[in-house]
Image: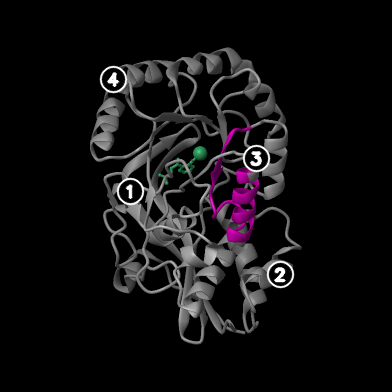
Amino acid sequence: LTIDSAELRLVRLPLVTPFTISTGTMTEKLFPLLTLRANGIEGYAEGVMDPLPDYLDESLPGALALLRTVLIPGVLGRRLANPQAITPLIAPWRGHRMAIATLEMAVWDLWAKSLGLPLADVLGGAGNSVEVGVSLGIGPIDETMNRIAAHLDQGYRRIKLKVKPGHDLALLRAARQEFPGAHLTVDANSCYSLADTALLQQMDAFDLDYIEQPLAWSDLHDHATLQARLRTPICLDESIRTVQDCRKALQTDAARVINIKVGRSGGYIESLRIHDLSAAFNVPVWCGGMLESGIGRAHNIHLSTLPNFTKPGDVSSASRYFHRDIIEQKLETEAGYMAVPREGAGIGVTLDRDFLNRVSDTPEEFRP
Ligand code: OSB
Ligand code: MG
């Protein structure tokens, strides 16, 4: 596999519904789309970094700089025996797990296509569909109750509610009263501290599957302190960037569930390690989402076929996010399950080039 050229472009898609979490509101999705080419085959990936560092400490300008100056030039003209061959290329760089993931995931798509196999099979996954839940943004409680009901009616198998101080216990009281049997979770996106321990302990009354990332994005120690005071499992999202983060979290009982985002963790090699380590600790994992277009969504679905993805992931219908997607296929959930796109090879989806050109800036071309 010799990579002969690459293309990088920025894509902007308006969101069907503005998405509010504790850190702010998103009304559009802006992301880098990377294409790698080898012998007439194309591999695709999208970056999940935000324009500003409000989810994690990575931002779009920094990620683009790394991709342009070292990551993409580093693979051009290089013969890669397998995806692991890029390891020395990414090893020098601190952090930037999202920029690295963008490159790494496109290499895996290309690699699977060169083998003529669906990415799920190359990764060691199995099955034709994966279990799916939804993540509902912050909004008025009555509106949220209607949205929960609508998504449960559609078959979604878990409802994750975004919370923040002042929008937490009353919301949970209402949701649990109206939907006594539903799988409910909350995601705080790091908005609480140990000073909120009493409030977080009150969440134990609502039989949540887990509480996602209640404390600081960079802090494992305080999560361990909190977990010792909670019955509800803590799930870590932002805090898991590497398998070493995961090891420290599991060794200290800072989390009892792990959210894996391949686009946040440097790609598949690290995600597979996180997946396997969690399994060794008997800790379930699930696939997180970052409001991805069809390219990132397809990647997430393939990853979700691995055996320890035993909780529903955030890989819901693309039509919930976008009026129109940049891929030709429709990634839609049926009765709570998302079909794995196994047409062709790799991630199993193809670009809708006319539409893509309308929603992206001028592509940047790279040659050796
Ligand atoms: O914390 O999981 C998160 C979206 C953007 C940034 C962070 C998060 C999310 C979501 C949405 O929860 C998941 C999705 O539906 O793609
Ligand atoms: Mg989260």
Residues at circles 1 and 2 in contact by the CB criterion of under 8 Å:
no
Q: Earlier in the sequence, mark 1 or mark 2?
A: 2
Q: How has the structure been colored for display? A: one colour
Q: Is residue 25 above or below residue 164?
A: below
Q: Comparing marks 3 and 4, which lies closer to the viewer? A: 3
Residues at circles 3 and 2 in contact by the CB criterion of under 8 Å:
no
Residue labelled with disc 2: 89
Residue 178 - label = 4
Badge 1 element:
strand
Q: In the image, which residues are magenta? A: 255-279
Q: Comparing marks 4 and 1, which lies closer to the viewer? A: 1
Badge 4 element:
helix
Q: Earlier in the sequence, mark 4 or mark 1?
A: 4
**Residue 58 visible, this orientation:** no
Picture quarter containing residue 76? bottom right
Badge 3 element:
loop
Residue labelled with disc 3: 281
Whether residue 91 sits left or right of residue 198 in the image: it is right
The quarter of the rendered structure image containing the N terminus is bottom right
The quarter of the rendered structure image containing the C terminus is bottom right
The type of residue carrying mark 1 is: Tyr
Residues at circles 1 and 3 in contact by the CB criterion of under 8 Å:
no
Q: Is residue 196 magenta?
A: no
The type of residue carrying mark 2 is: Leu
Q: Comparing marks 1 and 3, which lies closer to the viewer? A: 3
Whether residue 190 sits left or right of residue 153 in the image: it is right
Q: Earlier in the sequence, mark 3 or mark 2?
A: 2
Q: Earlier in the sequence, mark 3 or mark 4?
A: 4
The type of residue carrying mark 4 is: Glu
Badge 3 crowding class, 10 Å Cα cut-off, few under 14, some 14 to 19, many 20 or more, is: few
The type of residue carrying mark 3 is: Phe
